[in-house]
Image (spheres, grey):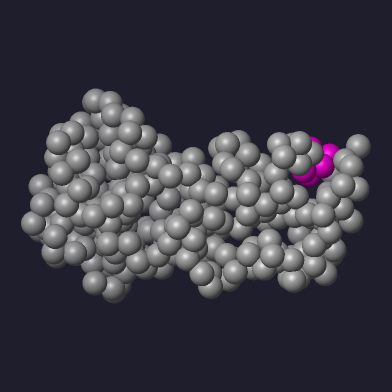
Amino acid sequence: MLDVSNLTPAGLHNTRVKQYLAIKNNTKSYPEKLVCLEGMRALSLALKANLQVCAFFICPELLRGDTAKDIAQQIIADGTSSYQVSERVLGHMTSWNGPDGLAAIVQLPDYSWQHLQLSACNTLLVLDGLQIPGNIGTIIRCSDGAGADGIIITNSKQRLSHPKLVRASMGSLFGHPVIECEVQEAAFWLHKHGFQIITASPDAALSYRQISYAARVAIVVGNEQNGISPEWYALHDVSVSIPMNGRADSLNVANAAVLLLYEAIYQQKLI
């Protein structure tokens, strides 16, 4: 039986509720990488990834089934600052129809180079200057699903905590290593550990299927409008293109990244 009698009641003027709304609406930068999660699926993924729940909000009237109650019980039992909110307040806080009574402020993990597990074959994606949060989140999700080893972000144009990025990642952001750094630092680490750096460019003479992705590779994709920064072209090993046989002159960057990623992983499994 879930007991919420000891929880602090919170309205729209509550400090934590206002913080939640500020994060959700992307009105303020949070160096500690705080994100808003709503619903039991998102929260269950966060708990599975052992993320820190900084504030928890529950509307008992909207709880659905034992799973939601179990999640709430676990979070409350961990000593998280927890608040009881009304349906009206939760309606202001959540952005999808049919909320199931749960929302939270959660801290994203802080990954470093040590979190990248090196082996005989590794595949990394480098996102250089991407600015559409949905693209970044989608690529993180696909990288995780394909079994890549992680993501490197250079010339960052969006916060990892952007609500649209978090939603598009579908939980992959919680456990798939994502490292933000400068181009020179990334290239130094990659070359030091024997990675072939492959840039994706529509002007490259070689098709993406004309090269070998054996051993360790890092595939660089660039900004949605301007492509990859000149810094990467000065540091890469080879550049490849994706043949365009129709009227469109290029693919969406997320589609291109996934196509290259699966080609690399396919070739590595043949070794």
Quadrant of the rendered structure where residue 98 is? bottom right
In depth, the one of 8 and 133 nearer the eye is 8
Residue 139, given in percent of the width and then of the height, sits at: 41, 53
Q: Is residue 64 visible?
A: yes
Segment colored magenta:
66-72
Residue 176 vertical position relative to residue 162 in the rendered view, above or below: above
Q: Residue 67: within the magenta? A: yes
Residue lying at 20% horizontally and 48% vertically, measured from the top left: 185
Q: Is residue 232 magenta?
A: no
x%, y% of residue 93? Answer: 71, 66
255 or 162: nearer the eye?
Answer: 162
Q: Is residue 249 left or right of residue 48?
A: left
Q: Residue at x 21, y 63 (%)?
A: 228
Tag count in the figure?
A: 0
Which image quarter is the N terminus in?
top right
Q: Quadrant of the C terminus?
A: top left
Residue 151 drawn at (x, y percent): 35, 47
